[in-house]
Amino acid sequence: MEITFNTPALLFPAISLLLLAYTNRYLALANLIRKLHDEYMRGEKTHHLLQQIKILRIRINLVRQMQFLGVFSFLCCVITMYSIYEGWSRVITISFAISLVSFLASLVLSLIEITQSTKALEWELSDMEELEKTNFFTDLWGGKDKKEPEEPKKEGS
Protein backbone atom coordinates (compact mmCIF):
# COMPACT_ATOMS: atom_id res chain seq x y z
CA MET A 1 0.00 0.00 0.00
CA GLU A 2 1.29 3.39 -0.92
CA ILE A 3 0.62 6.24 1.47
CA THR A 4 0.29 9.54 -0.35
CA PHE A 5 0.27 13.04 1.07
CA ASN A 6 -3.54 12.97 1.11
CA THR A 7 -3.79 9.81 3.25
CA PRO A 8 -2.73 11.33 6.59
CA ALA A 9 -4.40 14.59 5.60
CA LEU A 10 -7.74 12.75 5.68
CA LEU A 11 -7.34 12.27 9.43
CA PHE A 12 -6.83 15.99 10.14
CA PRO A 13 -10.52 16.98 10.14
CA ALA A 14 -11.54 13.84 12.06
CA ILE A 15 -8.92 14.37 14.75
CA SER A 16 -9.70 18.08 14.98
CA LEU A 17 -13.41 17.42 15.51
CA LEU A 18 -12.63 14.70 18.02
CA LEU A 19 -10.38 17.03 20.00
CA LEU A 20 -13.11 19.66 19.98
CA ALA A 21 -15.60 17.11 21.34
CA TYR A 22 -13.10 16.02 24.01
CA THR A 23 -12.53 19.63 25.04
CA ASN A 24 -16.28 20.17 25.36
CA ARG A 25 -16.55 17.05 27.57
CA TYR A 26 -13.67 18.33 29.68
CA LEU A 27 -15.31 21.72 30.15
CA ALA A 28 -18.65 20.13 31.05
CA LEU A 29 -16.90 17.90 33.59
CA ALA A 30 -15.03 20.85 35.06
CA ASN A 31 -18.30 22.74 35.56
CA LEU A 32 -19.95 19.71 37.13
CA ILE A 33 -16.99 19.19 39.45
CA ARG A 34 -17.16 22.82 40.56
CA LYS A 35 -20.90 22.48 41.22
CA LEU A 36 -20.45 19.28 43.22
CA HIS A 37 -17.57 20.84 45.12
CA ASP A 38 -19.83 23.70 46.17
CA GLU A 39 -22.48 21.20 47.33
CA TYR A 40 -19.85 19.25 49.24
CA MET A 41 -18.50 22.38 50.93
CA ARG A 42 -22.04 23.40 51.95
CA GLY A 43 -22.32 20.07 53.77
CA GLU A 44 -24.68 18.38 51.34
CA LYS A 45 -22.81 15.08 51.55
CA THR A 46 -25.08 12.34 50.28
CA HIS A 47 -24.03 8.82 49.37
CA HIS A 48 -24.64 9.53 45.69
CA LEU A 49 -22.58 12.72 45.85
CA LEU A 50 -19.53 10.79 47.04
CA GLN A 51 -20.09 8.14 44.34
CA GLN A 52 -20.35 10.85 41.70
CA ILE A 53 -17.12 12.46 42.88
CA LYS A 54 -15.33 9.12 42.49
CA ILE A 55 -16.78 8.64 39.01
CA LEU A 56 -15.85 12.20 38.03
CA ARG A 57 -12.24 11.60 39.05
CA ILE A 58 -12.16 8.55 36.76
CA ARG A 59 -13.88 10.43 33.94
CA ILE A 60 -11.58 13.47 34.11
CA ASN A 61 -8.55 11.16 33.91
CA LEU A 62 -10.08 9.34 30.93
CA VAL A 63 -10.76 12.63 29.12
CA ARG A 64 -7.17 13.73 29.77
CA GLN A 65 -5.88 10.47 28.30
CA MET A 66 -8.28 10.78 25.35
CA GLN A 67 -6.98 14.28 24.65
CA PHE A 68 -3.37 13.13 24.91
CA LEU A 69 -3.93 10.28 22.46
CA GLY A 70 -5.81 12.54 20.07
CA VAL A 71 -3.01 15.12 20.06
CA PHE A 72 -0.41 12.36 19.73
CA SER A 73 -2.32 10.96 16.75
CA PHE A 74 -2.38 14.43 15.21
CA LEU A 75 1.36 14.80 15.79
CA CYS A 76 2.03 11.44 14.14
CA CYS A 77 -0.02 12.54 11.12
CA VAL A 78 2.16 15.63 10.79
CA ILE A 79 5.29 13.49 11.06
CA THR A 80 3.85 11.19 8.38
CA MET A 81 3.25 14.14 6.06
CA TYR A 82 6.77 15.48 6.60
CA SER A 83 8.18 11.99 6.01
CA ILE A 84 6.27 11.79 2.72
CA TYR A 85 7.79 15.14 1.74
CA GLU A 86 11.28 13.84 2.58
CA GLY A 87 10.67 10.39 1.07
CA TRP A 88 11.39 8.39 4.25
CA SER A 89 9.30 5.33 3.44
CA ARG A 90 9.95 3.41 6.67
CA VAL A 91 9.10 6.43 8.88
CA ILE A 92 5.95 7.02 6.81
CA THR A 93 4.65 3.54 7.52
CA ILE A 94 5.53 3.53 11.21
CA SER A 95 4.28 7.02 12.02
CA PHE A 96 1.01 6.53 10.16
CA ALA A 97 0.41 3.19 11.90
CA ILE A 98 1.11 4.79 15.29
CA SER A 99 -1.27 7.61 14.40
CA LEU A 100 -4.08 5.18 13.58
CA VAL A 101 -3.48 3.12 16.74
CA SER A 102 -3.48 6.28 18.88
CA PHE A 103 -6.68 7.42 17.22
CA LEU A 104 -8.27 4.03 17.90
CA ALA A 105 -7.12 4.00 21.53
CA SER A 106 -8.57 7.47 21.98
CA LEU A 107 -11.93 6.27 20.68
CA VAL A 108 -11.89 3.22 22.97
CA LEU A 109 -11.21 5.45 25.98
CA SER A 110 -14.07 7.66 24.82
CA LEU A 111 -16.41 4.65 24.94
CA ILE A 112 -15.24 3.83 28.46
CA GLU A 113 -15.80 7.43 29.54
CA ILE A 114 -19.31 7.36 28.08
CA THR A 115 -20.16 4.24 30.11
CA GLN A 116 -18.91 5.97 33.25
CA SER A 117 -21.05 8.99 32.41
CA THR A 118 -24.07 6.74 31.96
CA LYS A 119 -23.46 5.11 35.33
CA ALA A 120 -23.44 8.50 37.05
CA LEU A 121 -26.66 9.50 35.30
CA GLU A 122 -28.33 6.27 36.39
CA TRP A 123 -27.46 7.12 40.01
CA GLU A 124 -29.05 10.52 39.55
CA LEU A 125 -32.19 8.94 38.12
CA SER A 126 -32.37 6.34 40.86
CA ASP A 127 -32.07 9.12 43.41
CA MET A 128 -34.97 11.03 41.89
CA GLU A 129 -37.22 8.15 40.82
CA GLU A 130 -36.17 5.41 43.22
CA LEU A 131 -35.17 3.09 40.37
CA GLU A 132 -32.18 1.44 42.03
CA LYS A 133 -32.60 -1.82 40.07
CA THR A 134 -33.17 -0.51 36.55
CA ASN A 135 -30.64 0.29 33.90
CA PHE A 136 -30.41 0.52 30.14
CA PHE A 137 -30.41 -3.24 29.57
CA THR A 138 -33.37 -4.07 31.80
CA ASP A 139 -35.34 -1.23 30.24
CA LEU A 140 -34.39 -2.44 26.76
CA TRP A 141 -35.54 -6.03 27.37
CA GLY A 142 -38.79 -5.22 29.09
CA GLY A 143 -37.60 -5.29 32.69
CA LYS A 144 -39.26 -1.93 33.27
CA ASP A 145 -42.74 -3.34 32.60
CA LYS A 146 -42.45 -6.13 35.17
CA LYS A 147 -44.21 -5.35 38.38
CA GLU A 148 -43.14 -6.49 41.79
CA PRO A 149 -45.50 -9.12 43.18
CA GLU A 150 -47.90 -7.58 45.62
CA GLU A 151 -48.14 -8.90 49.14
CA PRO A 152 -51.41 -10.74 49.76
CA LYS A 153 -53.91 -8.72 51.72
CA LYS A 154 -54.90 -10.05 55.08
CA GLU A 155 -58.54 -10.56 55.83
CA GLY A 156 -60.04 -8.07 58.19
CA SER A 157 -57.59 -5.29 57.28
Image (cartoon, rainbow, N blue to C red):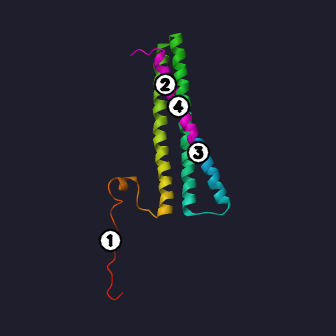
- Give percent across and percent down for residue 63: 55, 41
Decide which of tag 2 and tag 3 comes sooner along the chain: 2
Q: Quadrant of the N terminus?
A: top left
Label 4 to label 1, Cα distance in Å?
Answer: 50 Å
Label 3 to label 1, Cα distance in Å?
Answer: 42 Å
Badge 4: few (under 14), some or many (20 or more) residues near its Cα, within 10 Å?
Answer: few
Residue drawn at the location 33% of the way across and 81% of the way down: 153
Residue picked out by circle 1: 149
Cβ atoms under marks 4 and 3 closer than 8 Å: no
Q: Would you place residue 129 above or below residue 10 in this image?
A: below
Cβ atoms under marks 2 and 4 closer than 8 Å: no
Residue drawn at the location 51% of the way across and 29% of the way down: 15
Which portion, as a residue range, is magenta? 1-25
- Give percent across and percent down for residue 105: 47, 35
Residue 28, labelled with which disc? 3
Is 8 inside the magenta-drawn segment?
yes
Label 4 to label 3, Cα distance in Å?
Answer: 17 Å
Q: Quadrant of the C terminus?
A: bottom left
| Residue found farthest to the bottom | 156
Residue picked out by circle 2: 11
Q: Mark 2 or 3, which is nearer the eye?
A: 3
